[in-house]
């Protein structure tokens, strides 16, 4: 039997090949006599694993040399504090609020700086973005923060804003937790990007930070050493013991991504998957997605049944067809299909078949 | 062939049975159709895993009901900031410095409070402890911090100090990273205990905090939400996405510990292992351990060759006998055998045989 298709928003489906490799190497990595979990982070074996993971990710994401790539801990919610601790200088930072995640970021930043909301799409129920031309940036923000893909509301900036074109020379900070490695990143527009690993990179507990070198000089004195980007960078992400096994798994994912044709290859697959699913939803009389078409997320597809009372039957039927974790986030209800890199086209095809069959049954 | 014996100080050897279970369940946990890495932390499957892990650990460590047990991220070095952010109130906290780790804790705490060094064993080269009767506590410390086992210097408080007997009603904070679950804890003497998982509990990246309920009310406003003990406790360690796979592995370790007879059973094994190894070192003319006998660590046994020029030959010979990761910490040199719970008596016996054979060869 095939494995079930897992639409979890994160922690999320992993490539089956990666899990097989990890299982096979669990007790003995490459004849070392140790499992990866058992290796000193200072030893040559783990050193090789970490260096390969970093090099592969840098290659995949085409990260320029003047950016540091950091493996940290705490996930996106911790970064909501760690970023202003490192970048705000206690001054004003601007936030564009397009859903739950950017809202949380703005709220947490207020502990460390003045968080100015430059734009919000709250009045639309977060069903669209605010275009950069409509942002009301402050005079000299320390940085401008966006969440480039909102995991809960399913809205995505498919093109990153160009702050310089807006006359703003502040660094752009992007929370790319839920689209990292699904599409290319235009690093000329970015100062810092962060993301939890548990959607497209690997296990929960690993956090990726990509930061431009010139932004490493401004942490507040109250920034914990373990979360000071310069300290982490100066110690090759080993100031504190890194989440070694998670880095190893992420490294296997990076090699799998390369076998998919890299980011260009996986992006093409992601586009095909998203088009298929949104088309099926739009064609239906039972399901709907409220997000404006130009900014629909390719990773997280929230959808609703026009007849709410069918929700439980829908989920039970999905489980019986081996379509797992489709329940929507509790804050918005309904359904959500997260179709990250590791969820194959066949999974979306199976979901689309089920959508049609369920609708026909309940017409 | 048996697996090699792995003396790493952390990340460290795991019980072989745990690795086998994890490998077997990697693609499908208990018929769920998902690997544990792929499960939503909000789903019922992972909920069961997390609840069992917490209940088993509470049971093993006999944690009273008026303590919260938190699964966090960032390891001991992050806790060096997180603890004063949560407990210091910005006032004075006292530190007893008995090695590298307590020294780092005192240093980091100065970002958030006045860190008063109540005692230090630095003048002995950290080869002994300072007994509580000799501590110079401040008038009203917010808390008193000790590292109850110094991983690098190999000194251990086998009995926790009784602050009340010293006339001090401040909570005692213990960094028990490297002896957690190796011996019982007298919780009547403890306000908060923290430890990285990567020695005795599971994979690096998971951090355990055990905190008394009455200490949850005093975090500084600058404490990041994700590291605020009350926020973490109120959300059952799921305010941010927890390191789910690491919690699962730790849960398997807890069940393994129960099969070893719990903490009493494993403590008896640990005592036997430590006695055997220290005796062999003390009996030898080549090796020595500089720590006073009454406070030698049962987990981390640093030792030195009287003839330094033999170090490389010693390590190469050890590797050829499948005795791994014996090199000492770079800050002190020499050798270190970490003999945590998962390192079996047979491993110590093999090391002792090798110590004797190597000494005979080089007499």
Image (cartoon, coloured by chain):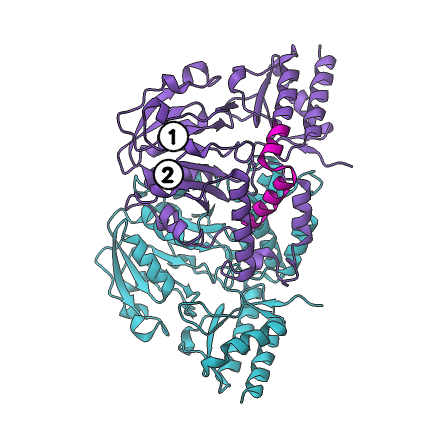
Chain colours: A cyan, B purple
| Mark 2–mark 1 distance (CA, rounded to whole Å) | 10 Å
Mark 1: which secondary structure? strand
Name the residue located 59 percent from the left edge and 35 percent from the top edge. Answer: A43
Magenta residues, as a range? Answer: B246-270
Would you call the spot at circle 1 few (<14 residues within 10 Å), some (14-19), or many (20 or more)? Answer: many
Residue A59: in magenta span: no
In this orientation, which residue lies closer to the viewer: A297 or A360?
Answer: A360
Residue on which disc 2 sits: B83
Left or right: where B293 falls relative to B348: left
Image coordinates of residue B70 in percent, x first then y, are: 45, 46
The mark found on residue A47 in the picture is: none
Q: Label the magenta part by its dominant secondary structure.
A: helix
What is the residue that sits farthest to the bottom in this orientation? A363
Evaluate whether residue A192 shows in this view: yes
Q: Is residue B229 above or below residue B10?
A: below
Q: Earlier in the sequence, mark 2 or mark 1?
A: 2
* Image point (31%, 45%), residue name: B217
Disc 2, SS? helix
Q: Quadrant of the N terminus of chain A?
A: bottom right
Q: As rendered, which of A36 and A236 lies closer to the eye?
A: A36
Picture coordinates of residue A198 (x, y %)?
Answer: 51, 56
| Mark 2 burial class by Cα count in 10 Å: few <14, some 14-19, many 20+ | many
Is residue B204 among the parts visible in the rendering? no
Quick check: A265 left or right of B75?
right
In this rendering, would B18 be left or right of B141? right
Residue identified by numbered label 1? B145
Chain ID, mark 2 = B
Whether label 2 touches label 1, CB < 8 Å: yes
Picture coordinates of residue B173, whole percent (x, y): 40, 33
């Amino acid at each position: 039997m095939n494995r079930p298709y897992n639409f979890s928003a994160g922690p999320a489906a992993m490539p089956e090949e990666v899990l097989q490799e990890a299982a096979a190497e669990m007790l003995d990595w490459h004849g070392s006599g140790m499992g990866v979990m058992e290796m000193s982070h200072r030893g040559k074996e783990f050193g090789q694993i970490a260096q390969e993971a970093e090099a592969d990710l840098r290659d995949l994401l085409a990260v320029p040399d003047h950016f540091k790539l950091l493996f940290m801990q705490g996930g996106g919610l911790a970064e909501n504090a760690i970023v202003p601790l490192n970048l705000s200088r206690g001054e004003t930072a601007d936030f564009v609020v397009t859903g739950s995640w950017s809202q949380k970021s703005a709220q947490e930043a207020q502990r460390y700086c003045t968080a100015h909301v430059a734009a919000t799409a709250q009045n639309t129920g977060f069903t669209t973005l605010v275009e950069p031309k409509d942002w009301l940036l402050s005079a000299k923000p320390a940085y401008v923060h966006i969440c480039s893909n909102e995991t809960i509301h399913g809205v995505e900036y498919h093109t990153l804003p160009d702050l310089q074109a807006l006359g703003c020379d502040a660094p752009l900070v992007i929370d790319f937790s839920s689209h990292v490695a699904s599409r290319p990143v235009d690093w000329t527009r970015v100062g810092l990007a962060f993301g939890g690993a548990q959607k497209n990179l690997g296990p929960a507990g690993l956090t990726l930070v990509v930061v431009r070198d010139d932004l490493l000089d401004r942490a507040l004195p109250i920034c914990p050493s373990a979360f000071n980007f310069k300290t982490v960078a100066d110690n090759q992400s080993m100031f504190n013991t890194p989440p070694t096994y998670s880095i190893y798994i992420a490294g296997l994912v990076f090699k799998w991504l390369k076998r998919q044709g890299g980011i260009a290859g996986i992006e093409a697959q992601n586009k095909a998957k998203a088009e298929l699913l949104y088309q099926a939803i739009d064609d239906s009389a039972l399901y709907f997605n409220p997000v404006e078409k130009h900014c629909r997320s390719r990773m997280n597809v929230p959808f609703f049944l026009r007849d709410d009372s069918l929700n439980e039957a829908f989920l039970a039927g999905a489980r019986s067809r081996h379509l797992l974790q489709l329940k929507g986030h509790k804050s918005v209800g309904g359904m959500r299909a997260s179709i990250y890199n590791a969820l194959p086209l066949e999974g979306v095809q199976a979901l689309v078949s089920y959508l049609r069959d369920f609708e026909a049954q309940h017409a």
